[in-house]
């Protein structure tokens, strides 16, 4: 057996069951070996799309996914998606063929590329150790929650595996939850006891039903309000004390209540500049606590009073075990009434600036939210528009929004939705894009159609890179570099086999309603011509981080 086949079999046996990529000569045999061993391979039209599909699949499914690419340009094409995954600590395995001969036109320092974007570089070095090294890559990805680049030199792939080499592969043991120390739990409980206005902010590390239940129980005991970072949106869906998202996307009421807290506890949450609005959501006398199972994450983004190293669910349950009598905290009738009446952005009054030619993005997303089934999974691209679908479209739980924004690249949204759709085939997948990102990733419209995904793609089309228009335009800068002639993106989608509709007014959304009621035999793209009269509410806050 050749190394390429042995590694493919070993990876599949170790739990790598979903692979995305673009196949070339260097990864042909490895990819086929994975498929023969039971993995599913999805061919993308570009390695960048494949990388983000794999990233999104891993996030939504909770399992490790793989990306398979050709040596050299196959890897460089994928780098933006790999960087997003690495920044998000996605358990992802990048399988890259590699040439080691410097005179080859495919030769680059792939190990250096991995380090440059924050991935962990590993390599298959010998035929005898190939299976063990492949399993180590899976272990690093899953146990350390890292994006791992496994380089597979062409010469080594072609070697015969020795008869006496270890041949069996088993999944690495499950990652064990980190138990907090008794002293840390006691310190956390004391701060909760002293607090009168606590709020819990849950992040990526709290995205599980067990963590949600534990946090809700602990919040009930101390009367805490609940919020999430953007990537964990939906975790507390349906809880009457949920403030939805903290940070730049927060509604006015949510921002007011969070800023008025005397204790903020970040649970598996970085409490970074986005989630805390550059610190403006932390009052001058507010105590800040951070709970994370990675000690290196504690206090990275802001000063904290207490850092607890521990699994979110375990820590919350240990704190609940030591809790005293129930305290009212912020669970008052006044706050309950305010949250019920004006927490959501769709409940905040606004002046509709749409006309017969262009629709207000707030009106567009409220209309879509009313039409779409509750069981949905949404992938959102980056740009001026992104706050509207992120906050105006509701999600059923923590797996309802796949938010690939750690690198703030545009063009990832469609691939994000494809990966999420494959991870959750029981839900309607919705990709929400800007016109710039839609045209960047248009090749993956073919992937949607080829896979037969009944997906809804919504494009907020303002014929520009809207973020730059609204950031630089008010200062009198010329905008010719970021504004474009009108593009009929609906026609582009029809060329890929989509059904498509152009939306200019709320009445045009009837076509979406008809598609939802029908067989959905083809995906639908909505080319929404949106007003471009202002930047979105979060844009000014976002550019403060540049």
Image (cartoon, grey):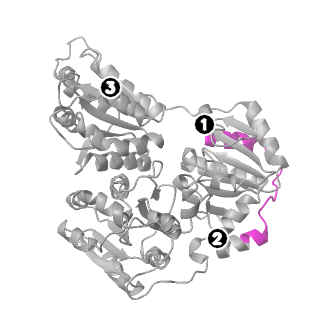
Give the class, few, some or many, for how many residues have Cα within 10 Å of label 1's Cα (few <14, many ≥20): some
Q: Is residue 525 left or right of residue 105?
A: right
Q: Quadrant of the N terminus?
A: top left
Q: Earlier in the sequence, mark 1 or mark 2?
A: 1
In the orientation shown, which residue stands out farthest toward the top? 164
Q: Could you tell me residue 510's position as x and y percent?
A: 35, 84
Mark 3, secondary structure of its residue: helix
- Rendered location of residue 29, percent (x, y): 16, 32
Q: Which residue is mark 1?
A: 297
Between 353 and 244, the one nearer to me in the picture? 353
* Camera-nearest label, 3 or 1: 1
Q: Residue at x 30, y 50 (%)?
A: 49
Q: Which residue is tagged 3?
A: 134
Residue 112, by quadrant, is top left
Instruction: Answer whether labels 3 and 1 touch (C-beta < 8 Å).
Output: no
- Residue with the mark numbered 2: 343
């Amino acid at each position: 057996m050749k190394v390429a086949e042995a590694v493919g079999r070993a990876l599949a046996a170790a739990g790598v069951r979903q692979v995305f990529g673009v196949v070339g000569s260097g990864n042909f045999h490895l990819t086929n070996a994975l498929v023969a061993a039971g993995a599913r391979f999805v061919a993308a039209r570009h390695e960048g799309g494949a990388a983000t599909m794999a990233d999104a699949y891993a996030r939504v499914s909770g399992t490790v996914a793989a990306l398979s690419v050709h040596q050299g340009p196959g890897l460089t094409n994928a780098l933006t998606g790999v960087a997003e995954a690495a920044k998000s600590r996605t358990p992802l395995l990048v399988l890259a063929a590699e040439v080691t001969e410097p005179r080859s036109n495919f030769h680059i320092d792939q190990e250096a590329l991995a380090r440059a974007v924050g991935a962990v570089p590993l390599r298959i070095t010998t035929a005898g150790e190939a299976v063990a090294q492949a399993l180590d890559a899976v272990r690093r990805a899953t146990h350390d929650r890292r994006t791992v680049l496994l380089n597979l030199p062409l010469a080594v792939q072609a070697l015969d595996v020795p008869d006496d080499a270890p041949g069996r592969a088993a999944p690495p043991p499950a990652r064990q939850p980190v138990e907090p120390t008794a002293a840390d739990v006691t310190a956390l409980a004391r701060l909760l006891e002293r607090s009168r206005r606590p709020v819990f902010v849950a992040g990526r590390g709290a995205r599980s039903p067990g963590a949600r239940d534990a946090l809700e129980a602990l919040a009930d005991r101390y009367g805490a309000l609940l919020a999430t970072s953007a990537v964990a949106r939906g975790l507390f869906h349906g809880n009457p004390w949920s403030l939805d998202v903290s940070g730049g996307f927060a509604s006015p009421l949510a921002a007011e209540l969070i800023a008025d807290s005397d204790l903020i506890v970040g649970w598996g949450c970085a409490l970074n500049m986005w989630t805390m609005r550059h610190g403006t959501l932390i009052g001058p006398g507010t105590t800040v606590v951070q709970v994370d199972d990675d000690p290196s994450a504690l206090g990275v983004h802001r000063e904290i009073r207490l850092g607890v190293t521990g699994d979110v669910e375990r820590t919350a349950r240990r704190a609940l075990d030591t809790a005293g009598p129930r305290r009212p905290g912020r669970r008052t009738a006044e706050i309950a009434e305010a949250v019920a009446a004006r927490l959501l952005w769709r409940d905040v009054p606004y002046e509709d600036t749409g006309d017969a030619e262009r629709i207000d993005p707030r009106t567009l997303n409220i209309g879509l939210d009313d039409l779409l089934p509750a069981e949905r999974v949404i992938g959102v691209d980056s740009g001026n528009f992104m706050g509207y679908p992120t906050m105006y479209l509701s999600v059923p739980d923590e797996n309802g929004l796949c938010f690939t924004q750690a690198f703030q690249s545009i063009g990832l949204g469609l691939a994000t939705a494809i990966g999420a759709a494959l991870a959750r085939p029981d839900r309607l997948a919705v990709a929400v894009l800007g016109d710039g990102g839609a045209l960047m990733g248009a090749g993956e419209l073919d992937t949607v159609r080829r896979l037969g995904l009944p997906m809804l793609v919504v494009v907020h089309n303002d014929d520009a890179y809207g973020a730059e228009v609204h950031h630089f335009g008010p200062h009198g800068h010329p905008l010719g570099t970021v504004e474009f002639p009108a593009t009929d993106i609906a026609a582009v989608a029809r060329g890929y086999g989509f059904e498509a509709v152009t939306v200019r007014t709320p009445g045009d959304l009837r076509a979406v309603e008809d598609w939802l009621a029908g067989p959905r035999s083809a995906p639908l793209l909505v080319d929404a011509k949106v007003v471009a009269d202002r930047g979105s509410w979060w844009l000014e806050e976002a550019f403060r981080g540049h």
